[in-house]
Amino acid sequence: MDNITHSVVGLGIGALIDRSLPAEPDTARERTRQRMLLTIGCLASNFPDLDLLYTRILPAPLGYLLHHRGHTHTLLAGLGEVALLLALVWLLWPNARRLLQVSTTARWGAVIAACAGLLLHLSMDGMNVYGVHPFWPWNKHWYYGDLVFIVEPVFWFAFGAPLAAIVPRPRLRWLFLGLMVLIPVAATLLGFLQWGSLAGLLALGLVLAWVTRHAHERHGARGRLALAAGLVVSLAFVGVQAVALQQARAVLADAVRTLDPGEQLVDTALSAYPANPLCWAFVTVARNAAGGTYHLRRGLLSVAPGFDPVKSCPAPIAGRAPEDATAQLAWLADRRESLAELRDLAFQDCHVNAWLRFARAPSIAGGLATDVRWGPSGSWNFSTMEIAAQAGLPCPHTVPDWTYPRADLLETK
């Protein structure tokens, strides 16, 4: 997920934890605890992305592909990140240190907020098409949720609206609420959101903001109803996405089987649209062992074609459906590549071998190694590596031992 989403969710969880704990005996300590738990929740929800500081350890694009969402995005490293964050709070924040020395409740709150923020980061990153491998070193496989878009405004509104509504200064409160409205409105005008998605987001934000202010007036600063409701809404949204995802997988499996009964579908990478469980972009990876090829198809899908046909899905996200698209399915690109060529490169070119520890939908067309999740074969995106340009370079020596996502094509374990 993007770091704005991580930050808003971390702040919301920190606030929810603070309001769920018994109050401190005086106002000053209560204010310090609130600030501390919000800060810890926000920082913990971003801490795993510290790996961006050392992605240059390998030449582009390998450094980013292999080390971002790398070791810092594992449960083992998370223990150290929690300890580091709490140590920094203790050393650099005198008021928080004094509070932690005398308040058992504050100490438990700090640990819970740090652990919750870290687990949320790993979980939210694992929900999109990019993937994570949280169980390293015991399990080195990538895990892909394929559930939510990498920038998901539902989470902004679910946690951001209650947070903005409890800002004590009216001008600052209205500034935050205004930004929450303006950003999705701009995204809709630019074509990234459908108008129905915008209406749903604004309705969600309005309800949660009203509940927050109403609860604040009745129960004071300890009210937590809207924050808890935001958490429930987020979980419910993920549940709806999961149901739509399974339907999309079934439709695509049938479609690929109909197009070529001789192929074996080995993977379907799906990317959701923001605030929209009906529209999906996809890449299918199929293998034809008899022909010695593998087949990459890119396209768009609507799981409710009668209500939201695929041509209505926002074009700037993954492309526009062609004129011959059905209401449910649009094919954007189609390419067969050689299994023998892929395997030869994998075991003769150390740079391609390293790249294949990331690529879920690998294409080696036109001398470019490209993961088709982010663009057609032969195109440039952040995953693209020029194969010939790496030939004279020494082999990379800091390659993590992630399992090859396409071990099923390389015939490795």
Image: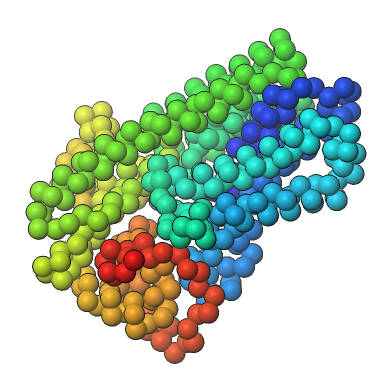
Up-down relation of residue 169 to residue 287 (above or below): above
Looking at the rendering, in which quadrant would you find the C terminus? Answer: bottom left
Up-down relation of residue 183 to residue 58 (above or below): above
Residue at the far front: name it: 138
Up-down relation of residue 384 to residue 117 (above or below): below
Q: Foreground: 94 or 401?
A: 401
Q: Quadrant of residue 368?
A: bottom left
The residue located at (56%, 22%) in the rendering is: 229
The residue located at (81%, 32%) in the rendering is: 104
Side of 398 where 147 appears, left or right = left
Q: Residue 318: x, y in percent?
A: 34, 50
The residue located at (66%, 46%) in the rendering is: 44
Q: Residue 276: x, y in percent?
A: 38, 35
Side of 221 where 48 appears, left or right = left
Q: Residue 222: x, y in percent?
A: 73, 19
The residue located at (68%, 30%) in the rendering is: 17
Residue at the far top: name it: 218
Q: Residue 118: x, y in percent?
A: 62, 45
Q: Quadrant of residue 98?
A: top right
Is any part of residue 348 visible from this angle? yes
